[in-house]
Image (cartoon, rainbow, N blue to C red):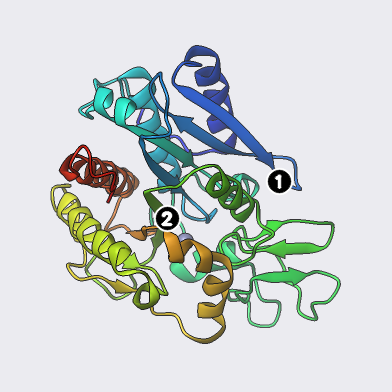
Amino acid sequence: MSNWLSRPDDVDALVARWRAEHPDLLTVESRRQYTGRDVWALTVTGPGVGESRSGVLCFKPHAHEPAPIAAQMNVLCQLLTGRTLAGDPTSLPRDQWLAEAVICFLPDANPTGTAAAPVEAWDGSQYTNEEFWTWMRGVDPDTGLMWKRVDLWDDTREENLPLRCGIVYEQVSEHEYVEPNRHHRSTLMGWLRELRARRHWDRMLDLHQTEFVGSTHNAMVILPTLYNDQPEPLRVIEQRWAEALIAAWNDVPGARPIPEFAPLGYTGQERQYFVNTFGDIYADTAILTSEVQNNSLLTPPPVQQQLCEAAIVATLTDVLSARARVAPDSGAVL
Ligand SMILES: [Zn+2]
């Protein structure tokens, strides 16, 4: 068995097995998509009271970006079993993480979309980027190219319906579809609201992939759209965490991360989508986006997965080292 596992049916089967075998470490919860598939929230922590532990929330919004699924499932496997999905002993500081952190994974926020993809991993050998993008957003009936990007669309109101529905969209009613991280009615945003109501998350890692067209790089970290409006303590955390993430990538064979990082550079309507969905999160939570190359011969799927895993590991390492720096009686948690 390899370390890669991302098909929704395979994820569901493994979740069912872990739920039966590791009830002491794993809490399994679902919000169900309109189309019937489970969007899992998989929370792992050691025995005992978790409220004082550091909270880390990892999530993956986009169905055409499967490496973050494989990465989260492999990290989770190591935390639960002490071994990778391939059966190798873990190198993670498992006992420390289980004792000091509550880690919640949303490995796949749109499994219906993931299940509709024509491949398990996008390795760049079967689809050009133009073809890949038509799988992502659908086929425009006029041009044959990628359909448009919107937060919500209604198939009774569109004049130019896509010839094939893009897998990035999540159907939320008989006629309506949303992009998971751009509209509050997605299952993803429902989960984030619910999880934020339960506890404070010290780090939120938003895992993505993109094509890096015309670039020699294959990984980058992005600060929040509203970074410049965030409270100073959050910006300090995000700066240090972003540097740690890039340093971790530099240790991965095949990694070519962009050494600099900046706030997400969207403007206009695209920026407004993020203000609408993530504005309250930016106000009180340290959150970074990681992007790893997708659909390119230059970054084979095992490297895509390792880069995503390195981002998760660097996040845990960062939050727990910050915890260790806090004086025991100060009450302040960075
Ligand atoms: Zn994405």
Judged from this view, the residue extending furthest toward the top is 21
Foreground residue, 239 or 78? 239
Foreground residue, 123 or 230? 230
User: Is label 2 within 8 A of ligand 1 (CB to nearest ligand atom)?
Assistant: no
Q: Is the residue 193 above or below the residue 49 in the image?
A: below
Q: Position of residue 253 (x, y in %)?
A: 16, 47
Contact (Cβ within 8 Å) of mark 1 with mark 2:
no
Q: Position of residue 201 (x, y in %)?
A: 42, 47
Density class for disc 1 (Cα within 10 Å; few <14, some 14-19, many ≥20) is: many
Secondary structure state at the residue bearing disc 2: strand
Q: Position of residue 235 (x, y in %)?
A: 29, 66
Q: Residue at x 20, y 28 (%)?
A: 91
Density class for disc 2 (Cα within 10 Å; few <14, some 14-19, many ≥20) is: many
Foreground residue, 184 or 16? 184
Q: Is the residue 173 above or below the residue 21 in the image?
A: below
Judged from this view, the residue extending furthest toward the front is 329
Is residue 239 among the parts visible in the rendering?
yes
Q: Quadrant of residue 219?
A: bottom left
Q: Residue at x 63, y 82 (%)?
A: 143
- Residue to which mark 1 is pinned: 33
- Residue to which mark 2 is pinned: 206
Q: Quadrant of residue 258?
A: bottom left
Alpha carbon separation for disc pair 1 and 2 = 20 Å
Q: Quadrant of residue 213?
A: bottom left
